Amino acid sequence: MKYMIETRGLDKQYRERYAVKNVNLKIRPGCVYGFLGPNGAGKSTTMKMLLGLVKPTEGEIRIFGKEVEEGNQIEILKHTGSLIESPSYYGHLSGRENLKIVQMLKKVPEKEIEEVLDIVRLDGQQKKKVREYSLGMKQRLGLAAALLGRPKLLLLDEPTNGLDPAGIQEMRELICDLPKHYGMTVMVSSHLLSEIDQMASDVGIINKGKIIYQGSLQKLHDKAKSSVCIHVLNQGAAVHILEKCREVFDIRGEELMFEEREEEQIAKLVALLAAGGAQVTRVSEQQKSLEDIFLKLTGKQVSL
């Protein structure tokens, strides 16, 4: 099986508006796939279509190498865990009692309750009423419920939303452990670039319902090359020289921006500008961040 999840031409249209348009996901087995995009980009709608909670307008969904149809949807979902939006729970019951209800509904062995409580580090709080849980504990309880049945695939929609820094760190560590220790494939959505950067091996960026980047996180990092910034006093002379030599550059205020270059190439460039009367006063290197790449792709500022 090449892909755990694969979609082809996936659309969801509401009247005249497309919430998701021509989405072609390719999620490898055993990876943490970060599904990244601004709020309202189509992340939740896409994940709900994968889970059968929203019916696609057009397109094909394949999970575990099988095309999802009415006849096999239940069988596929048996091996899929999910945490979409806020987890549901009974506040007057303990954490363990809540999991007991899910365990009976899923018809899985009772011993799995102990296993998932241990995985999400709630074994010491299992007898406590859920209404007394912190938000982070409730999120972990929701994750525990999703893990019952030992799913091969886990879909988590904004699992760190509303958590404090300690809760975010804890959830991140749990998600990163799942493929390594339990062989699961995890698809996790977020509008927080820093979160995806620390959790995912693969990433898909969605904006206005369309996938604008999909691939390894390392390739996205490779796009974040540094730029050479040269400050000049006589910009007109500098532009004349550079255009004459067919150099590729951008203008930012009084500074000229160039793609990453070797030191020898920078020295030649400075000498060329100086000889032409551009009056070079400063040379610096600016490292592009992932935020810069995201902003360039989506045209929107991303939350850090």
Image (cartoon, rainbow, N blue to C red):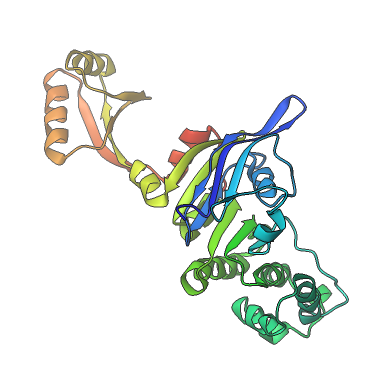
Q: Is residue 180 visible in the rendered structure shown here?
A: yes
How far across and how far down the image is residue 90, in percent? 85, 71
How far across and how far down the image is residue 291, in percent? 47, 44
92 sits left or right of 111 in the view: right
Which residue sits at x=48%, y=59%? 29
95 sits left or right of 302 in the view: right
Q: Quadrant of residue 162?
A: bottom right
Which residue sits at x=44%, y=56%? 201
Q: Quadrant of residue 246?
A: top left
Q: Is residue 304 visible in the rendered structure shown here?
A: no
Front-lying residue, 50 or 66: 66
Which residue sits at x=71%, y=51%? 71
Q: How many marks?
A: 0
Which residue sits at x=71%, y=72%? 141
Q: Is residue 220 above or below residue 248?
A: below
How far across and how far down the image is residue 17, in percent? 72, 27
Front-lying residue, 200 or 154: 154
29 sits left or right of 52 in the view: left
How far across and how far down the image is residue 34, in percent? 52, 52
Residue furthest to the right: 92
Residue furthest to the front: 71
Q: Is residue 79 above or below residue 158?
A: below
Front-lying residue, 12 or 96: 12
